[in-house]
Image (cartoon, grey):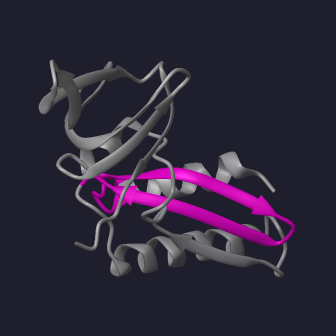
Amino acid sequence: MNIDKIEAVINDFFIANEWLDCFIVEIKVKDKLIEVFVDCDGGINLQKCHKISRAIEAYLDETQVIGEQYVLDVSSPGVGTPLKMTRQYHNNVGRNIEVNTATESVEGILKEVTDAGIMVAFTEKRKEGKKNIKVDVEKTLLFDEIKSAKIKVSFK
């Protein structure tokens, strides 16, 4: 199975359909199962997943790269999946995020994304004399420091 060929076909499909806002997050292949996780800069919908799936299926059927026996699954990465690409962070500005580095875990609102990293805003409790106070904090984390980051879904 040539993952690079599948990735090239998907990218060509995005260009041909002027879906330059779409990108591959990950491709997994195990035995005859091909899982393709895609996202778009504003989110992905069922129609785009369906069209991408049909394009990949047509390519696999035409080229017989893996024969006739395979299972193809095209979907978005899902809410609980760790963020892997800078473009995914942009999609989630304003949402709750949990970020882990080698030295700390930060949970708050994703406020900003730059080429170098992200800014997370949260409220921190501090002791000032005998009183406990709440302080609003904005923390910048560089992408090089981030070990994992997940969007936290709140049903409040």
- The residue under the point 47% across, 20% down is 145
Res. 118 visible in picture: yes
In what quadrant of the picture does the N terminus appear?
A: bottom right
In the displayed structure, would residue 122 be above or below residue 144? below
Query: How many numbered discs, if any?
Result: 0
In the displayed structure, would residue 65 be above or below residue 41? below
Res. 121 visible in picture: no
134 in the magenta segment: no
Q: What's drawn in magenta, residue-wise?
A: 15-41
The image quarter in which residue 141 lies: top left
**Magenta stretch mostly in which secondary structure?**
strand
Q: Nearer the viewer, residue 137 or 70?
A: 137
- The residue under the point 83% across, 72% down is 32
Q: Nearer the viewer, residue 11 or 48?
A: 48
Residue 134 in the image, given as x and y percentages of width and height: 13, 34
Residue 60 in the image, given as x and y percentages of width and height: 69, 70
- The residue under the point 15% across, 18% down is 129
Q: Nearer the viewer, residue 39 or 133?
A: 133
- The residue under the point 17% across, 27% down is 137
23 in the magenta segment: yes
Residue 153 in the image, given as x and y percentages of width and height: 34, 64
The image quarter in which residue 45 lies: bottom left
Tell me: 147 left or right of 116: right
Residue 130 in the image, given as x and y percentages of width and height: 16, 24
The image quarter in which residue 156 lies: bottom left
